[in-house]
Image: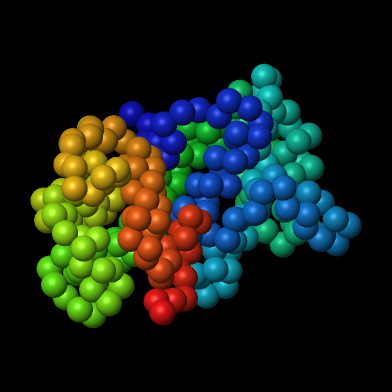
Amino acid sequence: MVRRIFDSSPSSWQDLEAKVHLAFQEMGYESHKGKAVQTVRGEVEIDVLAIKQTTPIPTRVICECKYWNKMVPQNVVHGFRTVCSDAGAHFGLIISKKGFQPGAARSRISTNIHLMDFDEFQETYFGEWKSGVFIMLTRMRDQILPILRAASGATEYGLDLIDEPMIAGIDPMKKYSMFFGLEGGYSNYFIQQETFPVTFSDPRGDPRTIRQITVKSHRHYLEIAKEAVAECNARFELPETYFSSSGQLLVPVARE
């Protein structure tokens, strides 16, 4: 069974590039789509450039996305290998819709080029993606933590950010159990090996209304969490202290 980052396959070449770009972004890479890169032979446009800045020496990954209705031939691999070398990439990925001709597969032996279809890309990076999303979800939890603290009467990072009438009648532990739940919180699914589907309280919508939702996949979990945090930011006027839509850690902003 393929471990999937996305619940649907790419529907176009633009969608393939967008999914690869987003996957690296959610892993914590600095990710660029349609990036112009200067090489020793001149400027080249890269489908996706991903840079892992958390390693002692930043790791540069160049991705070529081929949404072709035919297998990728050998000459494409040769050309891409030159681009990777000239651009200083640590390794390159060619992600193909229809796979590769036998000569293409042989030509990448003993090189830093890796050939894969979209399912293989997801399988290869699934573990790193889950770790990246775990960090995102931790930041989201910290972003909405003032709701829980205000509901419990805490003044610091609670009622100093949210007026008491705004949280009256809200049970954050039930409503936001995807973030705060002791039994089945996100670590069970993004660090441990618990499987889907699973039922949670839906963290979206009226915070005083508790309704159940069945979460079907890791991607579904993340998208629901993103929507919930965006709603909480707007409803409770929370400063975007920890989490942005791109998953980056933000500088704390004091509420006046």
Res 105 → quadrant: top right
Q: Quadrant of the N terminus?
A: top left
Q: What's the residue at 26%, 45% (across, down)?
A: 206
- The answer to whether any part of residue 162 appears in the image is yes
Asked whether 76 or 68 is in front, the reply is 68
* As drawn, 127 above or below 11: below
Q: Position of residue 159 (x, y in %)?
A: 23, 73
Q: Quadrant of residue 215?
A: top left
Q: Looking at the image, which residue sits at the far front? A: 165
**Horizontal and vertical percent for residue 143?**
34, 64
| Residue 210 relative to residue 249: left or right | left
Taking the spot 24% from the left edge, 61% from the top edge, the residue there is 166
Vertical comparison of 28 with 55: above or below: above
Query: Is residue 73 found left or right of 253 in the rendered image?
Result: right
- The image shows residue 100 at horizontal and vertical percentages of 64, 28
Q: Residue at x 41, y 68 (%)?
A: 239
Give the quarter of the image for residue 68. Answer: top right
Q: What percent of the width, then of the height, locates residue 185?
A: 19, 52
